[in-house]
Image: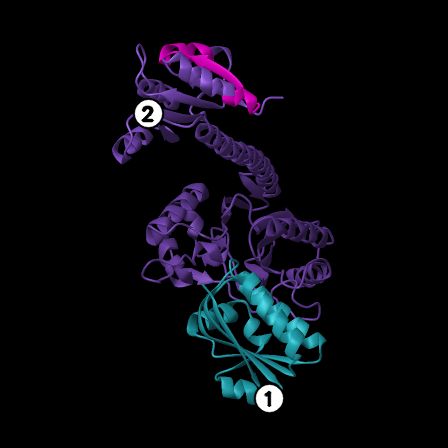
Chain colours: A cyan, B purple
Amino acid sequence: MLNIQTRQDGTASVVSIQGKVNFEVTAQLRDVIRETVATAQPKLLVINLEGVSFIDSSGLGLLVAARNSVDKSGGRLHLCCLPPPVKKTFDQTNLTNYFSIFATEQDALRGA
Amino acid sequence: MAKGVVLVVDDEAPIRDILSFYLKRADYQVLIAGNGAEALEEMGRLRPDLIISDLRMPGMAGDELCKHVKADPATQDIYFIILSAMDGTASRVGGLALGADDMIPKPFHAQEVLAKVDSSFRLIGMQKEIRRQNRELTLFQEKVQEEMELAAALQMGLLPKLPGEAPGARYTHRYLPASGIGGDIYDVLPLPDGGTAIMIADVSGHGVSAALISAMVKTSFENQVRLGGEPLSWARGMNEDLCRSTLAEQFATAWLARLDPGEDSIRYVAAGHCAPLRIVSGARGGLHRSEVLRGTGFMLGLDPGLPFTESRAECQPGDRLVLYTDGMVEVEREDHDMLGEAGLRRLCAELPADADAAADELVSRIRAFNAPSPFVDDVTLVILDRLED
């Protein structure tokens, strides 16, 4: 079961995810991200992965697609708070170098 | 046309007559019988939709008839109403325990019986509709299942034929898709200049869409390799192909390599894929050390502009390569401990010389490590042995 929370921080939107991100829940997450991008049109979308215990290839695909859609609307996507197992998956697939990744949500919001 | 067929079973003629009269007037076709045995005879001629039966009758009584009807698969769907002189909850429950669908206490008003029959027929109609829909669903499901099996067979056909032979090498695979068909693919192809091209890939997601893309990955690889060249140009070409033809969320991790006879090294590009193992002298069997053929590169299909880098590693005749997809080492056990790359190296330290025996041994060791958790993702294992002269 995936728990997703969204909030606005100025012109930024923050989506916090908790749980296992696999192909069973990507539809749910896709809807939330799509709606957030469409309604808030954030300059910056921060996805906080602190509560994510596992992410599979469908989940990674979703994040890549999110980056593409944010790019297209002239915004930026920042990821933050990757737990060690998730970090490992990102390292293995070299996505660490594809996304802008931050240690804390504050850093991600500042873009520092 | 009659609304349905009702069989009235009672040893008292006046009761049969009055029920018959009301039911016929309400457009039901009525059959009559004086006891259970006669009722069964009557049912042999025409199957009723509903039976109204007295309980106490000479010959075969109502309870026995009810048990008979409800025990036979051919008649168990017939709605059974017991008419009983014994009023009160106890006998009512007793009658329903026999398998009857409803009870009407005696004495009764014919109108009450008719109302009950009408409502029973509404239920019968709904049940018939549900059964019809169930049959349709079952047929649909069978058709989907058949198509999936066909697709799975087609996909198996995309894998190299075993035993696999390449110049100076021999290989085998174990392919275990999570749900009939999956997104893993590998290939070993001869190059125009005498070398051998090797590819293993894992498409994001599962099932039919992943399987379609895996076929695309294979075709793209074949097209690249036909031109000769090296892993770096293949990776670039395949990345462009996949970016062009897949949706935003779809991509593949891949590991592409080139082996040349007479050379002591292997050239490869890692595109987000788990790094294969090189077991030094592993093709001889026994205890050997392993190395990880690591590299950094992006997955295929993310972005056409992303860079790839080619690596080179030692690879001698007698060496064994173990290629795999992440589903093999990433099964979450109850203690949340995954086998991972380090665990796989441990399990690969000592394997039989024969590649097929080694593949079976390795899969069973991994299953034992994960037990009782089964594989949940597509799993592909390829063992390629470089032959010694």
Residue contact at pointers 2 and 1, CB within 8 angstroms: no
Give above or below for A80 relative to B85.
below
Q: Mark 1 points at which residue?
A: A10
Horizontal and vertical percent position of residue B151: 61, 40
C-alpha span from label 2 to label 1: 77 Å
Give above or below for B127 relative to A74.
above
Q: In this view, does B148 lie to the left or right of B368?
A: right
Observer able to see residue B309? no
Residue that appears at 70% across and 71% down: B305
Quick one: label 1, few (<14), some, or many (20+) residues within 10 Å? few
Dot 2 amino acid type: Ser
Q: In this view, does B336 lie to the left or right of B120?
A: left
Q: Quarter of the image holding residue B125?
A: top right
Dot 1 amino acid type: Gly
Q: Which of B129 and B7 is in front in this view?
A: B7
Q: Name the residue under label 2.
A: B84
Q: In this view, does B15 lie to the left or right of B218?
A: left
Residue that appears at 62% across and 51% down: B209
Quick one: label 2, few (<14), some, or many (20+) residues within 10 Å? many
Image quarter hosting the N terminus of chain B: top right
Q: Quarter of the image holding residue B69?
A: top left
Give above or below for B289 relative to B11.
below
Give above or below for B153 relative to B15.
below
Q: Quarter of the image holding residue B138?
A: top right
Task: State the residue lying farthest toward the left.
Answer: B90
Give the SS element for disc 1: loop
Is B35 colored magenta in this rendering?
yes
Instruction: Point out the stretch of residues depicted in magenta.
Output: B22-43
Q: Is residue B185 left or right of residue B13?
A: right
